[in-house]
Image (spheres, rainbow, N blue to C red):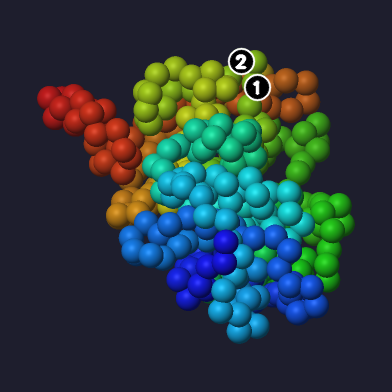
Amino acid sequence: MEIDISKIEGNNTRLLASDVGDISKSFKNYGQFSPIRVKKHSSKEGAFEVIFGNRRLATARALGWKTILADVVDASDTDALIMAFSENEDRSNCTDYEKALLIEKLHLLSGKSYSEIAEMLGKSPSYVSQHIAMLHLFSEEKVSEPERKIVLQQLTEKHARILQRIEDPNERWTAAKLVVKSAIGVRELENMISRTYKKSFDPSRSSPQTRIMQIIKSHIASMNSKDTSSYFEAVLKNQFTKFSCYPPLSRLDCASAKEQLFDMLHELRDYEAAIESLELRVVGKLAYALMTLRNKYSNSERTITAEMRLTMILEKKGDDWKIVHEHWSSATPAKFLSLFANQELQSTVSKKHSGL
């Protein structure tokens, strides 16, 4: 049906709606072939919201059209986002960054964990994690939002994963701009990062302390970038266990630890951990590290800083070291858990510690 364009509200999921040159030529020469999809506006009587077709809507507006061909469907806001993701996923002009924004918007709107969203979208948790990590690739304090959007629109998720290996945020931003300016491919970037920002050691030539320190720093850096896949690269997957200060507060194997960390990190808007003190001892083929970390957490409402304690046990396997156990604890558990949604658990923890 034809709908008055003035009654249609676009959304900001597709960021480059102004880039409509090819569509504009087609509209001028042949008209509109396929309708956009809209739903009734959630708060405005007689108005509509775009589910997908933002570029077509922007083109029609730019050409001065008064109406546009549209399919009207009955859908909730959550259903509309799922439709938008499914429609745009395989389109060549839908960037990985735009997919990440759709996933994040779905997370905020539905209140569901990222693991649940992955299931809703028919994707793996790692797919969701790797796309969401793009949203945290560059510091909001160092790079303006318009600059970030322009660069991220032109990077793939694979580019972003490689760039995350650069620890210094300024160097990471510089490398990203070079990728965009020079149209550097994923493989070329991989080679460039390996040569310029080489972080790996030959385990057989480095001391145990040096190698273990590198593993620990990489481990924490992965958390800061919300890259759970990289976080678990150094663990001995079939033997790894973890005790965590975050629900469910129980012993976890590698698979459950990965899911739990994934949900925790992405329930937060920002996360930053810094090692304040570290004691490392190596005894034969075993090593343990005792750490104090200063962690900053932010959700949609507030930011807190909390002291965390981490005990890590590593075992030498072949020429390298692997993490076999972690135990996280908080000096202020009630304060830490107050950022998360499980109010019943918060209350239980608060009562438990008030009686100590």
Give the image location of residue 121, x and y in percent. 58, 38
Is 163 displayed left or right of 183 in the figure?
left
Q: Residue furthest front?
A: 1
- Tell me which residue sits at (59%, 42%) in the image: 129
Instruction: Identify the amino acid type marked 1.
Output: Leu
Instruction: Identify the amino acid type marked 2.
Output: Gln
Residue position marked by numbered label 1 in the rendering: 236
Q: Residues within 10 Å of mark 2 (few under 14, many from 20)?
A: few
Instruction: Say which element carries label 2.
Output: loop
Residue position marked by numbered label 2 in the rendering: 239
Do the CB atoms of the residues marked 2 and 1 lie less than 8 Å apart? yes
> Which residue is nearer to you in this view: 300 or 87?
87
Give the image location of residue 192, x and y in percent. 83, 58
- The mark tally for this picture is 2
The label number, if any, that marks residue 282 in the structure image: none
Give the image location of residue 97, x and y in percent. 63, 57
Asked if residue 339 is positioned above or below residue 91 in the image, the reply reads: above
